[in-house]
Every structure is written in structure tokens, then in C-alpha cells.
Image (tube, rainbow, N blue to C red):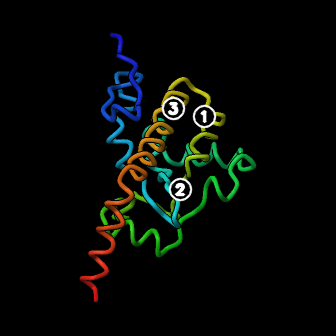
């Protein structure tokens, strides 16, 4: 079974599967990837758990691989969320709250676009390389979207400020 290899592009934000491993999709479409990119501390980032899911490894294994190569991930590539940032994400239903015995025991790490680029050197499978390419293209598409709609965002912000007054 062959899968078509399309990646996110600036013109076409809808793309299909880029690779299949054990009948599991590696990267689906750009919209799904873009929905996993958040703005924290004024930077676009992705959660370690989302990246681990895309790379098809448990979050613990993903973070252990990164820790073994910590010199590749300076603070501007990867940082740990504060409790307030984590609480904000959980309150917005971006990530699930710890319930029962499963779930997070530590505050999550987030990766910037540069951190995602560095992951392909740490996680060396074909899946990792293709996933990194797809995620990088999603970051570019997000930047392009913000750039193309900056005027609209400013107008909405001004309207919100007027309503608060």
C-alpha cells in the first residue's frame, strides 16, 4: 500500500499522509499540525506530548531522547512551561488534566520551530525526518497566515480594546 507524499505548502494547506508505519499515519494534514501550535511567551511552540504522538513514541521516551542530547536544545529551542502556563492550557482544554494514575507528573516541555528542526537529528528514523519536515512546513504556514492577516488581527484587537473600555 503506497501513500501519496504531499507536504504542507503555503498555497495548499490541505495535505495528505506523508508516510505510513505499521498502518498508522505519521503526519496527516497541515491544518491538524497547525492546531497543535500554540503561542506561549510570544513564541510559537508545540507540546512535547503532541510531538511524541506525531513521532509515534511515548512522551517519556521522547523526552529521554532529548535529555540525552540536551546540548542541542538551548532555552530558545525548548523550555519547560510554568505552572501558570500549564494551568492556562488545561483550562482552555488544549491538554487534558491529570486524572487518576495516568497523565503528567511533570510540567511539559515545549519546542520552538528551531527545536523541532533539531529533533530530526536526535530522533533518526524515517518517520522522524518526515514528521519534522511536515511540522516545519506547518510553522511556516502559520507564519504566512499571520503575516497575510496581520491587519485583520490588529482590527479585531482594537475592537476588543474598545469593548473593554
- In three-dimensional space, the C-alpha distance between marks 2 and 1, rounded to whole angstroms, equals 16 Å
Tally the numbered discs: 3
Image coordinates of residue 56 in percent, x first then y, are: 45, 35
Mark 2 nearby-residue class (10 Å; few <14, some 14–19, many ≥20): many
**Residue sitting nearer the eye, 8 or 16:** 8
Is 73 left, or right, of 162 in this rendering?
Answer: right
| Relative height, residue 87 to residue 45 (above, below) | below
Q: Which residue is mark 3?
A: 133
| Relative height, residue 59 to residue 18 (above, below) | below
Is 107 left, or right, of 19 in this rendering?
Answer: right
Image coordinates of residue 69 in percent, x first then y, are: 71, 44
Q: Which residue is mark 2?
A: 110
Image coordinates of residue 57 in percent, x first then y, are: 49, 38
- In three-dimensional space, the C-alpha distance between marks 3 and 2, rounded to whole angstroms, equals 18 Å
| Relative height, residue 88 to residue 55 (above, below) | below
Image coordinates of residue 59 in percent, x first then y, are: 50, 47
Query: Which residue of the protein is positioned furthest toward the bottom in this rendering?
Result: 165
> Where is the N terminus found, in terms of image quarters?
top left
Please identify the quarter of the rendering in which residue 154 is found: bottom left
Please identify the quarter of the rendering in which residue 16 is found: top left
Look at discs 3 and 2 and give the one toward the viewer. Answer: 3
Amino acid at each position: 500500500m503506497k501513500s501519496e507524499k504531499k507536504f504542507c505548502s503555503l498555497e495548499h494547506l490541505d495535505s495528505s499522509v506523508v508516510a505510513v508505519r505499521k498502518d498508522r499515519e505519521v503526519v496527516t494534514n497541515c491544518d491538524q499540525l497547525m492546531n497543535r501550535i500554540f503561542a506561549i511567551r510570544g513564541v510559537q511552540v508545540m507540546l512535547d506530548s503532541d510531538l511524541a504522538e506525531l513521532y509515534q513514541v511515548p512522551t517519556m521516551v521522547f523526552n529521554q531522547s532529548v535529555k540525552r542530547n540536551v546540548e542541542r536544545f538551548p532555552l530558545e529551542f525548548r523550555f519547560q512551561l510554568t505552572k501558570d502556563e500549564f494551568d492556562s492550557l488545561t483550562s482552555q482544554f488544549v491538554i487534558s488534566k491529570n486524572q487518576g494514575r495516568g497523565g503528567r507528573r511533570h510540567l511539559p516541555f515545549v519546542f520552538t520551530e528551531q527545536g523541532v528542526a533539531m529533533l530530526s537529528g536526535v530522533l533518526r528514523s524515517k518517520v522522524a525526518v518526515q514528521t519534522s519536515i511536515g511540522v516545519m512546513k506547518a510553522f511556516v504556514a502559520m507564519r504566512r497566515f499571520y503575516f497575510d492577516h496581520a491587519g485583520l488581527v490588529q482590527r479585531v484587537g482594537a475592537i476588543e480594546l474598545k469593548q473593554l473600555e
